[in-house]
Image (cartoon, rainbow, N blue to C red):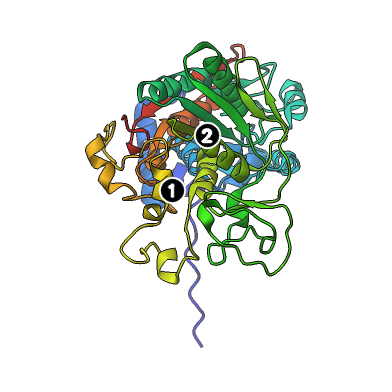
Amino acid sequence: MSRPAKAKRKPSIADVAAAVGVSKTTISRYLHGEYDYMSADTRARIEAVVKELGYRPNKMAQGLKATNSRMIGVTIANISNPFSSQLLKGMQSVCRARGIQLLVSDADDDPALERAAIESLMDSQVDGLIINTVGGNDEFLTTFASTAGNPPIVMLDRMISPIVCDCIVTDNAGAVDMMLDHVRERGFTYAVFVTQPAAGITTRQTRAEAVRAYLATHDLAGEVLEYADSPRDDMDYGGMTGGSGAVSGSTAGHGRAVDNDSATHGSTIGHCGTVDDGSTVDDTVGDNGIVDDGNGVGLAARLTSILDAHVGERICIFANNEDAMCDVFAVLAEPSEPLSESCANGDDHDGRNDIDRGKDRDNAAGNVGHSNDHNHVADDDHDSAIGAGTVNGVGTTVGLCAFATERWARYSGPGITCLDQNPVLMGRTAASRLIARIYDGDSSPAERLEIPARLRVFGSTQKR
């Protein structure tokens, strides 16, 4: 009986060294990016042999034997949104060029998960951390960054104060001013900045404060609206309920009848049919007429109230991020009857889109254009084609804009005018900064680096 052939042995570092004609120490230095005393010819020969033999170093073994593991840990606040994926793309491009491995953990918007992720990454012997924080961990992160012996960290998009580590952020105040200048130039008279709760999250706080400052010093009225609920969590397009049963004693927009199988007393259905639980909102009105939703709840009810209060004006809703923009879409969606299966898949009921059924509101404050051309300004001749390319039947009485990546915004509805934060550049900058701290001997003082946002104009803020 013949003996089975032995499996082909994987090449070792000793094999590479023998083929190149250098010591294993030289190969190890090459693999760790330590080229200071290595000639270009030696580097080229090592690279060629590594490729020829198909040698793949054991990263974990390297970490045990070397001072540096050549691994960087990353925590992302919420990996599900497009912005986060672009941040990672930028980081990866820089790390790949330096032979550094990224270990990524999703904190799922949970401060406790973020702390656990950081501790887990530390157990994996990472050389440093890039943290896109969920917020609420400032004391933990400040202590971590200030403790001798801990690896360096870089904060990305959201920062901590005081600045004890490098912080890579958007020029949020400048971006807000740029967008609101555009909103005024397009003839809008009322702006609503919509954001999830800002407490503990510097990005949201900075943007909300910039909006308030702008409205206080320019001829543009408006308000800051914080909300804690997400309409997308509760909407049921088959029965148009808010997830808590049918509504009893409710008021429906445009005379749409509501069937009641179970009681949810005191609720209100607004323009989009979204159900609010009837809780009151304690609005605080400042001296400049800016309204803040003090309770941070009831996005559907609050936006409906704003639309009703400003009929005849040009209103523009300015969303803090892609998630907030999607929530606004959900609120503005207005099927006037339960959606059929075909309509739920994007087909019209009878040749008309859902927006055609709400014309009594469409004429209130001006229509949204629908061109996807870069920086294109739709003219009034396009009004007859309202609704082409809309998402969820978004209403056409308001302008829409957001902090959002252009790749996402360009193909959403009519094309959403956006402030693209260039997340790939932000990710690259964060990785480059951390690598310089870890491997290149950069010991300069920690600093805050601001990346300018780019205004991208599409049909959602057309001029009238």
Where does the image place residue 329, in percent across and percent down from the top left?
Answer: 49, 47
Q: What amino acid type should be assigned to the residue bearing mark 1?
A: Val
Crowd class of label 1 (few under 14; some 14 to 19; many from 20; radius 10 Å): many
In this view of the protein, which residue sits in the foreground, 330 or 59?
330
Is the residue 186 above or below the residue 24 in the image? above
Q: Is residue 93 visible?
A: yes
Task: Give the side of residue 215 with respect to residue 393, left or right.
Answer: right
Q: Looking at the image, which residue is at 66% across and 55% down?
A: 250
Q: Earlier in the sequence, mark 1 or mark 2?
A: 2
Q: What amino acid type should be assigned to the residue bearing mark 2?
A: His
Q: Looking at the image, which residue is at 31% across and 40% down?
A: 369
Mark 1 vs mark 2: in front: 1
In this view of the protein, which residue sits in the foreground, 137 or 358?
358
- Tell whether label 2 touches label 1 (CB within 8 Å): no
- Work out which residue is located at the far left of the displayed protein and give it: 381
Q: Looking at the image, which residue is at 26% across and 38% down?
A: 373
Which disc number belongs to residue 394? 1
Which disc number belongs to residue 32? 2
Rendered image quadrant of residue 142? top right
Where does the image place residue 372, in percent across and percent down from the top left?
Answer: 29, 41
